[in-house]
Image (cartoon, rainbow, N blue to C red):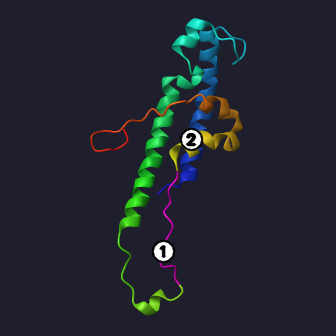
């Protein structure tokens, strides 16, 4: 099973591969020399989040968000299982609260922590101003 840190690192690696192409696309679209203001009004109206709103960025975000959500669900399900029955003598010196649940907020890993983990991607992920995830009729993230 993958860890949250491995998922975050794969996300960072995938965005790093994608970012140069997105910068070229954005510069052509906005007719800019740099990734800076002023962006022409017609471009800003169509792409208010800048190059962060590109469908490929959102697809990468969704991919890793859903993977983190699955890992969180697995941890919650494991925490709800009854502990294995042990002889009372085997329980001496153990924590009766069980193991901590491994749960992480996807937005922390995919947006908020990126400024420290990958400063070169901060501007890209800071433009993700909404979570492109919904819930189906079973309250599952889709």
Q: Is residue 97 magenta?
A: yes
When the figure is inspected, residue 58 is found, relative to residue 112, above or below; the finding is above
**Relative to 141, is 55 on the left or the right?**
right
Q: Secondary structure at mark 2?
A: helix
Q: Nearer the viewer, residue 88 or 35?
A: 88
- Label 2 crowd (10 A; few <14 / some 14-19 / many >=20): many
Give coordinates of residue 59: x percent, y percent.
47, 31
When the figure is inspected, residue 111 is found, relative to residue 89, above or below; the finding is above
Q: Secondary structure at mark 1?
A: loop
When the figure is inspected, residue 138 is found, relative to residue 53, above or below; the finding is below
Q: Quadrant of the C terminus?
A: top left
Report which quarter residue 66 is drawn in.
Answer: top left
Name which residue lies at 61% across and 16% down. Answer: 26
User: Of marks 2 and 1, which one's residue comes earlier in the chain?
Assistant: 1
Q: Nearer the viewer, residue 130 or 29?
A: 130
**Relative to 27, is 47 on the left or the right?**
left
Q: Which residues fall within the magenta stretch? A: 94-104
Report which quarter residue 37 is drawn in.
Answer: top right
Is the stretch drawn in magenta largely helix, strand or loop?
Answer: loop
Return the residue at label 2: 110
Which of discs 2 and 1 lies nearer the camera? The answer is 1
- Label 1 crowd (10 A; few <14 / some 14-19 / many >=20): few
Give coordinates of residue 54: x percent, y percent.
52, 23
Q: Nearer the viewer, residue 123 or 138?
A: 138
Give the residue furthest to the bottom. 89
Return the residue at label 1: 97
Name which residue lies at 57% across and 22% down. Answer: 49
Using the numbered discs, state the Cα–Cα distance from disc 2 to disc 1 in whole angstroms: 30 Å
Name which residue lies at 32% across and 44% down. Answer: 139
Q: Is residue 20 magenta?
A: no
Name which residue lies at 41% across and 50% down. Answer: 70
| Picture disc at residue 112 | none
């Amino acid at each position: 099973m993958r860890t949250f840190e491995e998922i975050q690192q794969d996300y960072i690696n995938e965005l790093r591969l994608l970012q140069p192409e997105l910068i070229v696309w954005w510069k052509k679209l906005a007719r800019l020399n740099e990734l800076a203001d002023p962006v022409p009004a017609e471009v800003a109206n169509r792409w208010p989040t800048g190059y962060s709103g590109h469908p490929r960025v959102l697809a990468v975000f969704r991919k890793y968000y859903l993977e983190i959500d699955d890992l969180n669900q697995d941890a919650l399900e494991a925490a709800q299982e009854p502990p294995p029955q042990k002889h009372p003598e085997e329980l001496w010196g153990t924590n009766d609260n069980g193991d901590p649940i491994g749960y992480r907020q996807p937005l922390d890993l995919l947006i908020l922590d990126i400024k420290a983990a990958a400063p070169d991607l901060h501007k890209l992920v800071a433009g993700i101003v909404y979570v492109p995830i919904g819930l189906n009729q079973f309250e599952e993230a889709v």
